[in-house]
Amino acid sequence: MKDVVVLSGGVGGARFTRALRDAAAGQGMRIRVIVNTADDMWMAGLRICPDLDSVTYTLAGVNDEQRGWGRIGETERVSAELHAWGIGWPWFTLGDLDLGMHIARTSLLRDGVPLSEAVARLTSRWDLGAELMPMTDDEVETHVVTGEGTMHFQEWWTRHRAKLPALGFDIRGAAEAVPAPGVVEAVLEADAVLFAPSNPVVSIGPILSVPGIREALASTSAPVVGVSPIIGGSVVRGMADACLTAVGTATDAAAVARRYGARSDGGVLDGWLVDLVDAHEVGELATRGITARAVPLWMTEAEAAQRLARDALALAGSL
């Protein structure tokens, strides 16, 4: 396969994309990554794009693997000074190197540069081995409805650690948004489309909510294969279980696949990778029009992650 598109968000998506790039090294594969931007927000006058930055830093090799977010070797002097002035959220710390990215991006946006072009300019600093594409140039932000009021997703996720039961998710601006330039074309031109093991509700879900993207997935001749973010009834990373519970979906690999649905039945999936411990779900998914395979999903080390990426490509190639 020479043209692969990945739908990605968050750390899991970033690590899967890196593994795909490394597994395909030297094969001339073009990798385009459509990244969730509904986690984005304005803070201290800056446009913060957490998922775009996570994917960028991971592919560039400058991410902090221990913390799982931000730049390696960070300092936080500017954040401390901002907090002393009462600016920003004291529970949402931005590193000094990370602030450099936010300042540069905001400067471009204030000059009238669309987000997609800003991403292209900023990521050209590194040889990422993949092309990053925001899902839209329009501002889309996820807000979480709770019993204590509605709040930005980052407040619910970072401050409250998703402990406040969510009653629903309001992806503001999505219905009016337009796919970023090249996003629909990338899906239609691809040899394969892969859903990274990202949060299906607040990472992949917002991408699918932008009018035109789901329709492109329905129309593309490329096989669409997803990787489960759930192993043995538990989340691989983060707090996706809290999100799934809020939308009435069980924390289960097959349940997430059913939520996406089979393309043959109006959904978006042709294939689905589950972990070996969930192999018993393969047959049930087949009855719903989704070809599933059980393979090791844990990306505990580079070789395991690359093997997973190859398994995803192999499943796509068989469909």
Image (spheres, rainbow, N blue to C red):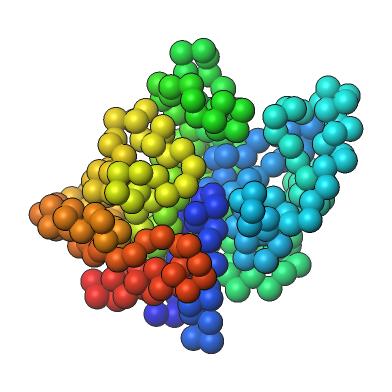
Q: Residue at x 59, y 61 (%)?
A: 132
Q: Residue at x 88, y 24 (%)?
A: 85
Residue 93 in view of the camera: yes
Using the image as rendered, state which of residue 82 and residue 278 is in the foreground.
278
The picture quadrant where one finds residue 44 is top right
Task: Say left or right for 84 vs 110.
Answer: right
Residue 219 in view of the camera: no
Quadrant of the drawing holding the C terminus: bottom left
Give the vertical position of 70 relative to 62 (above or below). Answer: above
The picture quadrant where one finds residue 224 is bottom left
Give the vertical position of 92 relative to 287 (above or below). Answer: above
Using the image as rendered, state which of residue 34 and residue 99 is in the foreground.
99
Residue at the farthest left position? 287
Residue 23 x, y percent position in the rendering: 48, 77
Residue 278 x, y percent position in the rendering: 24, 54
Quadrant of the drawing holding the N terminus: bottom left
Residue 107 x, y percent position in the rendering: 81, 47
Residue at the farthest top position? 148
Task: Say left or right for 207 vs 276.
Answer: right
Q: Residue at x 46, y 13 (%)?
A: 147
Q: Residue at x 58, y 70 (%)?
A: 130
